[in-house]
Image (spheres, helix red, strand yellow):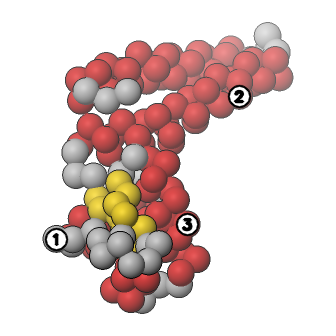
Amino acid sequence: MVTLFADGAKLLGIPKSVGEVYGILYASKHALALDGIVDLLGMSKGSVSQALKMLRVLGAITEANDRDNIGRKTYYQADIELKSLVGGFIQHQVRPHLENAENHLADMRNLEGSESQFYTERIDKLESWRKKAGFLLPLIQRYLGSK
């Protein structure tokens, strides 16, 4: 299961370690603390901590308090709802890229000048793709019941 999520993360351009951490949390019956994740995956605390931070931002994990109320450990568990995973990915990974693309396309229009029909058509096509994605993403999020 860990490999499945690691491969999926790489496919989406997310660090493999983020997929591995999510995979171990997904496969675990109980919430895990940072040290437990480090032990199970054999990764450094820094790598696991960074992965947990990204997973929190994406809304892919939830936090739970120390089960024994002895220490101040935070335990993590995977959010297994597709709407949370896709919604978080769209909101924090895809939308910022679309917004940047709009600025880059405007810059390209200013650079290309009017003499090149070929580049004008290519930029128009990219703008069309960006607009379609901008229209489609909110529909996907609405369908999944996410933000």
Asked if labels 3 and 1 touch by Cβ distance under 8 angstroms, the answer is no
Q: Is residue 91 above or below residue 134?
A: below
Taking the spot 52% from the left edge, 59% from the top edge, the residue there is 53
Q: Does residue 112 sit above or below 146 in this rendering?
A: above
Of the pair 15 and 32, the residue shown nearer to us: 32
Q: Is residue 67 visible?
A: yes
Q: What residue type is labelled 2?
A: His
Q: Which residue is situated farthest in the front direction here?
A: 70
Q: How dense is the environment of label 1, judged by Cα within 10 Å: few (below 14), some, or many (20 and up)?
A: few
Name the spot of residue 86 as percent of width and height, x first: 33, 40
The first of marks 2 and 3 along the sequence is: 3
**Residue 50 circle label:** 3
Image quadrant of residue 76?
A: bottom left
Q: Residue furthest top?
A: 114
- The amino acid beneath tag 3 is Gln
Read off the residue under disc 1.
29
Q: In which quarter of the image is the C terminus?
A: top left
The three-letter amino acid code for the residue at tag 1 is Lys
- Looking at the rendered image, the disc whose residue lies closer to the viewer, 1 or 2, is 1
